[in-house]
């Protein structure tokens, strides 16, 4: 994963967040590792850290941030959330585990809805490819007169209910705020946020083919979770109910 990140984003600062501690007799020298920086989870200020750590298995520790992230975007007012296992996603849930994970995420969405006083929780889906995510989006964005057998409506011939944007950290990319302001839409907007390492070239091509426009969030390179939350707040401020 590190090699992929460095190859596609040589200008990124790479940080290794390590949840475990080296066992006695094991020599670990962070200075000799390829990362720009190493952060120890025990230094993050998590209350009762060891108890928190042992409430998760190995995979869950690496993905425990997803629940708090979903809670925050639900608080911000998103209508639907589609969590996608992308070409570069790590880990890759499957089978019974995916069902349990989806159920947990939906419970998080319900909890966030109660906290904010919303009438109903956002719909939460877990899908296993960008292709499948586009099918979910097509079902949500079908226009009157669309052919029902089409899995992905073509924007050139059918138009779109909601404008679609994919976040892109490339310098010079037009900002999400400016794009939203230029194409004001009462129906809101659809935001695509890639995993760490971004979408693959195949996924970018697919997103472009169904009307997603690349949009930036300024000069800073943000973590995937931070970028998603930031994008939601920007959209809510420009075309949503935070205006």
Image: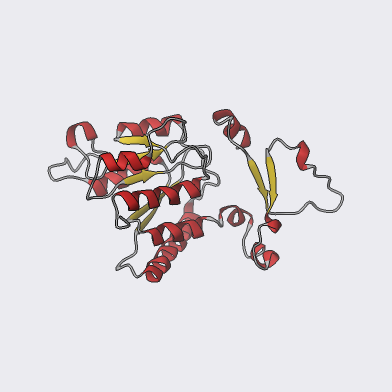
Q: Residue at x 34, y 64 (%)?
A: 121
Q: Which of the 4 quarters of the picture holds residue 133?
A: top left
- Seen in the picture, residue 33 relative to 189 is either above or below; the reply is above
> In the displayed structure, does residue 215 sit left or right of residue 223?
left
The answer to which of 142 and 222 lies nearer the viewer is 222
Q: Is residue 131 visible?
A: no
Q: Is residue 186 left or right of residue 214?
A: left
Front residue (pair 203, 174): 174
Q: How many marks?
A: 0
Position of the C terminus by quadrant:
bottom left
Residue 113 quadrant: bottom left
Looking at the picture, the colour scheme in use is: secondary structure
Rendering quarter of residue 172: top left
Is residue 146 found left or right of 58 in the rendered image? left
Q: Is residue 231 left or right of residue 197?
A: left
Answer above or below: position of 105 versus 141. below
**Where does the image place residue 1, in percent across and percent down from the top left?**
60, 37
Q: Pick the residue in front: 174 or 112.
A: 174
Q: Give the percent coordinates (x, y) of residue 109.
A: 41, 63
Please report the residue visible at 48 percent of the width from the left and 56 percent of the height from the top.
69
Query: Horizontal and vertical percent for residue 126?
Result: 41, 52
């Amino acid at each position: 994963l590190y090699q992929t990140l460095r190859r596609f984003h040589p200008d990124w600062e790479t940080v290794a967040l390590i949840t475990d501690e080296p066992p006695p007799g094991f020599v670990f020298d962070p200075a000799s590792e390829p990362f720009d920086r190493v952060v120890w989870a025990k230094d993050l200020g998590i209350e009762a850290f060891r108890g928190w750590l042992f409430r998760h298995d190995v995979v869950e520790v690496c993905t425990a941030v997803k629940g708090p992230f979903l809670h925050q975007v639900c608080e911000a007012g998103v209508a639907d959330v589609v969590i996608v296992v992308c070409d570069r996603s790590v880990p890759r849930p499957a089978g019974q585990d995916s069902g349990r994970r989806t159920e947990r995420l939906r419970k998080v969405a319900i909890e966030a809805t109660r906290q904010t006083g919303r009438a109903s929780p956002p719909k939460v889906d877990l899908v296993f490819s960008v292709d499948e995510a586009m099918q979910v989006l097509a079902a949500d964005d079908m226009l009157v007169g669309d052919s029902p057998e089409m899995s992905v409506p073509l924007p050139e011939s059918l138009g779109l209910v909601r404008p679609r944007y994919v976040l892109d950290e490339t310098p010079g990319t037009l900002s999400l705020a400016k794009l939203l302001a230029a194409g004001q839409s009462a129906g809101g907007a659809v935001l695509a946020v890639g995993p760490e390492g971004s979408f693959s070239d195949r996924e970018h091509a697919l997103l472009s083919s169904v009307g997603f426009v690349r949009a930036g969030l300024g000069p800073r390179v943000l973590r995937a979770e931070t970028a998603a939350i930031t994008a939601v707040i920007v959209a809510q401020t420009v075309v949503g109910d935070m205006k």
